[in-house]
Image (cartoon, rainbow, N blue to C red):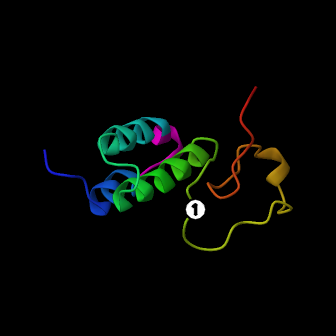
Amino acid sequence: MAEPTRDDIDALVGPATPHFAYQLRARVRELVDDLPADSDVRRYAEEKIDLLDRLGHASSKAEEGPDEPRDRLGAEFVPSWASADQPLPPRR
């Protein structure tokens, strides 16, 4: 198998949704598992693994456009309203 590239990582992470974040995180981790720790691709993948972990606690990736304000009318009725950059805290 050829050595993975950033494009390979992006192909997995790009269409990620909260529902599949942890499955994709496992695939990315497996894809770069054999790369050396100082590999640029591995470091890039680790950044994306962190994003996928946050996405797993979110309701949207919301990478484009402005975030909706948390004080927006009706927001208190949507407790799962969270983006990957401001995910909900993990359940205990």
Q: Relative to 10, does residue 66 appear above or below in the rendering?
A: below
Was residue 19 drawn as part of the magenta stretch in this picture?
Answer: yes
What percent of the width, then of the height, locates residue 83? 65, 55
What percent of the width, then of the height, locates residue 86? 71, 55
Was residue 35 drawn as part of the magenta stretch in this picture?
Answer: no
Quadrant of the snapshot with the C terminus: top right
Quadrant of the snapshot with the N terminus: top left
Q: Relative to 43, does residue 24 appear above or below in the rendering?
A: above
Kindly identify the residue that appears in the image at 64 percent across and 42 percent down. 57
Where is residue 29, by image quadrant?
A: top left
What percent of the width, then of the height, locates residue 77? 81, 45
Q: Secondary structure at mark 1?
A: loop
Inspect the image, locate mark 1, and give the three-letter code of the amino acid beneath it: Ala
Question: Which residue occupies the extreme left position in the image?
Answer: 1
Kindly identify the residue that appears in the image at 55 percent across and 66 percent down. 63
Magenta stretch prevailing secondary structure: helix
Q: Residues within 10 Å of mark 1 (few under 14, many from 20)?
A: some
Tell me if 25 is positioned left or right of 56 in this view: left
Residue position marked by numbered label 1 in the rendering: 62
Q: From which residue to which does the magenta span run? A: 16-21
